[in-house]
Amino acid sequence: MAKSEIAEFFHGRSVFVTGCTGLMGKVLVWKLLNSCPEIKNIFVLIRSKRGKSALLRYQEIIKAPLFDSIRKTNESLLSKLQVVCGDVGADELGISPDMKEKMIAEVSIVFHGAATLNLDASLSEAINLNTTGTLRMLEFCSAMKNLEAFIHFSTAFCHVDLETLNEEVHKSTFDAHNIMKLQSWLNETSIKKVTAHLINPHPNTYTFSKRLAEDVVSEFYPKLPVVIARPSIVTPALKEPLPGWVDNLNGPIGILAAGGKGVLRSILCNPKYNAEAVPVDFAINAVIAIAWKTATTKQNTSGIPVYNLTQHNLNPITWHTVMTKGREGTMENPFELMLWYPTGGITSNRFLHTYKVICYHWIPAYLIDGIMLLLGQKRFMLRVQQKISDGLRVLQYFTMRKWDFPNDRLLALRESMNDVDRREFNMDFEKMDMNDYFRKCILGARQYCLREDPATIPKARKTLKVLYVLDLVVIYLKYALVAWFLYKVYQVVSTAF
């Protein structure tokens, strides 16, 4: 009987994971424990944050719903997780000498996913964590005696100025080391003054810093077995660890949730362009397979391996389809506490979008907060709309542009896997049922992000019907008001002549 070559490879090996508190990191840890149960140890780098110790944050992670299956079936697997108190933003990663010695002797596979994903992060923060942090990781891992693969998590949008991003490293305009020195020399005020110039043509510090990080990683090849993995927009899980599982409302899922709540009525977006997205479980299956392939294949010294973790032309989906399927999903399984009937739409016309934002976002927000003020209640709607406005400002750069991400190396990797691994580490984009997937996305956002009990769906459907009637009433009143106004204008004109 055929066995999983990937699971066999990880048997008895120890891995080092950074970024385990994020969406991809959590799923990566879960998948390694679930599909490679004979793995020796998983060292997880966690920093203290907002008054919470690394150990406390670790406890919160393993108590999350995605680890329920492991706790119920084989809780002893969790003992393989070794908490490493540290921070990629600190020298030597802030790891204690004893732990460093143990990891250097034991770790053979590294998954580096730690980064600030905040698209509005200051340049100083982005460079320190995403670029210099990557350099610190590479220097730390250079001492590992048995290193077989170092997988760097990048992004498919690290070269936004290229319409076609092939699976290779493209040198940046600026030298990464000079930018890192600049970040360490200048104060925050000075850095802010030069940020716009430095990051051009990038829309934010995140993609710029990840671009520089790729340059840093490539410098260590072939001295180290480094590989770059570039996922596109990471979306909720198709199947694992739970259908629709997601722990944040970033990207498309945030749009669908805001639209489903009735607070988002217009998005500036070209409906014909593809939404470059990949389910988180597909992305994680890919990086695990990449680690296996890297460690078991002789290195090609001609260039660092780069994998675009994208759907490309396998099962493309346009932004129009995303919004249509998302709206159908919210109609079937509506959210709780909807502020209005979800009738939002997309447009590539900036004037029309601005008009809709003013009429359907800001004016209602001022009216609602005004009523709350008169009632002596806490105002909230303007704050909500400001967050939505900030999110749309960042996202519309990606919804109004078109890119092409060839994924030949990823497809070749998939073909090299045996049937057992093709099933266990699924990357079959072609077989995705988009209707079913978006239904899972809505249910996942509802349950795991908004903490809404599935049992409340019937009640939410009744609320949706009421809001539908109210929406029709408002629409007819609006038409009636316009008709009355035109009639009055006609009367005035008729009287004048």
Image: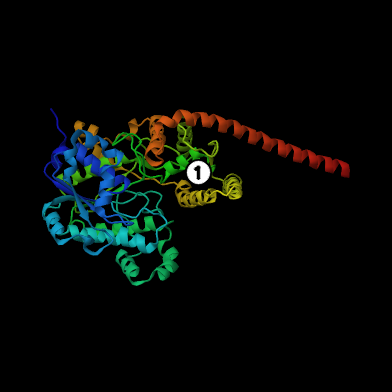
**In the image, is residue 474 above or below residue 181?**
above
Whole-percent x and y of residue 353? 57, 46
Residue density around tag 1, few if under 14, some if 14–19, many if 20 or more, within 10 Å = many
Label total for image: 1
Tell me the SS state at disc 1. Answer: loop
Is residue 112 at least partly visible in the picture?
no
Among the 4 quarters of the image, the one containing residue 91: bottom left
Q: Amino acid at mark 1?
A: Asn
Report whether 354 appears left or right of 314. right
Which image quadrant: the N terminus? top left
Give the camera-side residue of 318 and 462.
462
Q: Quadrant of residue 13?
A: top left
Res. 90 visible in picture? yes
Question: Residue at image x 40%, y 64%?
Answer: 198
The residue sitting at 34% across, 32% down in the picture is: 430
In this picture, is 432 found above or below 305?
above
Q: Give the colour scheme shown.
A: rainbow
Residue 221 horizontal/vertical position (percent):
21, 56
Q: Which residue is mark 1?
A: 270
Provide residue 403's location: percent of width, then percent of height: 41, 47
Q: Quadrant of the C terminus?
A: top right
